Image (cartoon, helix red, strand yellow):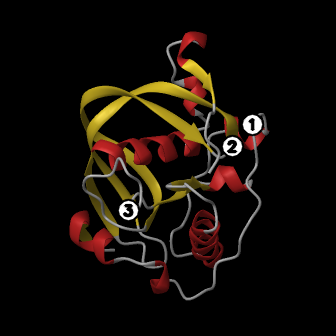
Amino acid sequence: MTSAYVDDAVGRWTEHDLPVEGRVLEVVRAPATVLSSVGDAVDPTAPETVQLAADLVATMRVSPGCVGLAAPQVGVGAKVFCVDVTEHPKTRGHHGTFVLCNAVVVESSRNEKAREGCMSVPDLTGDVKRASRIVVHGQLPGTGEQVEVSAEAFEARALQHEIDHCEGLLFLDRVAGAHAIYPRKTYL
């Protein structure tokens, strides 16, 4: 496996790099056990991981307002997720659509509080403090290429939200308390 600076490798990656068609899967909702369980590390070159990556992107694409989706959200206890914040109004910089396997945050700075929602908790939003600048190491599905993603602002928040899903955490686990949880006002 080779190493690459993610802003190039991730920026060039598309779901069309995967040799399979994605299927739209059902999104599970809290309190499903898979959402509170730590996902397993995966072999990013395994056929089932490649199919899962394609399925995550396909499911994200048909879900209005969705900017990311993790394997546990489709009932699979694995450390795989997709992100695409391109169309979100809060987006400044982004890498387009990409999928990461076995991702971990290796650097973070400048915590900021902002409102988050989740397809697995559709009736609530919450104020969550997260780093506004991060560096993430992970692997691309299919090739297994090791990549490093430098992200900030809304994309950094989306990455942390999806990595949390892979670690068995929901945004509700990150809020300061009940006073920071709100009924969702807008359904997309």
Horizontally, is 121 left or right of 112 in the view? right
Q: Label 1 crowding class (10 Å Cα cut-off): few <14, some 14-19, many 20+?
A: some
Quadrant for the N terminus in the image: bottom left
Indicate which disc, 1 or 3, sits on the residue closer to the N terminus.
1
Disc 1 or disc 3, which is closer to the eye? 3
The percent coordinates of residue 86 (x first, y second) are 38, 62
26 vs 52, nearest the viewer: 26
Under circle 3, the secondary element is loop
Residue nearest the viewer, comparing 87 with 42? 87
Residue at the spot of label 3: 86
Write the residue at 51% across / 47% down. 162
Asked if residue 76 can be seen in this view, the reply is: no
Residue beneath the point at 42% across and 78% down: 14
The single residue placed furthest to the bottom in the displayed view is: 19
For the residue pair 101 and 93, the one nearer the viewer reads as: 93
Name the secondary structure under disc 1. loop
Query: Could you tell me which residue is drawn at 37 percent across and 76 percent down?
Result: 13
For the residue labelled by badge 2, is the local secondary structure a helix, a strand or a loop?
Answer: loop
Please, what is the three-letter code of the amino acid marked with disc 2? Ser
Distance from label 1 to label 2 (Cα)?
6 Å
Q: Which residue is mark 2?
A: 120
The answer to which quarter of the image holds residue 185 is top right
Q: Determine which residue is flagged by label 1.
A: 30
Percent coordinates x, y for residue 4 in the rendering: 23, 69
Q: How many marks?
A: 3
| Disc 1 from disc 3: Cα separation | 27 Å
Residue 103 higher or lower than 13, as above or below: above
User: Which badge, 1 or 2, is on the more N-terminal residue?
Assistant: 1
Q: Amino acid at mark 3?
A: Thr
Cα distance between the residues tagged 3 and 2: 21 Å
Instruction: Please state which amino acid type lies under the numbered disc 1.
Output: Ala
- Label 2 crowd bin: few (<14), some (14–19), many (20+), radius 10 Å: some
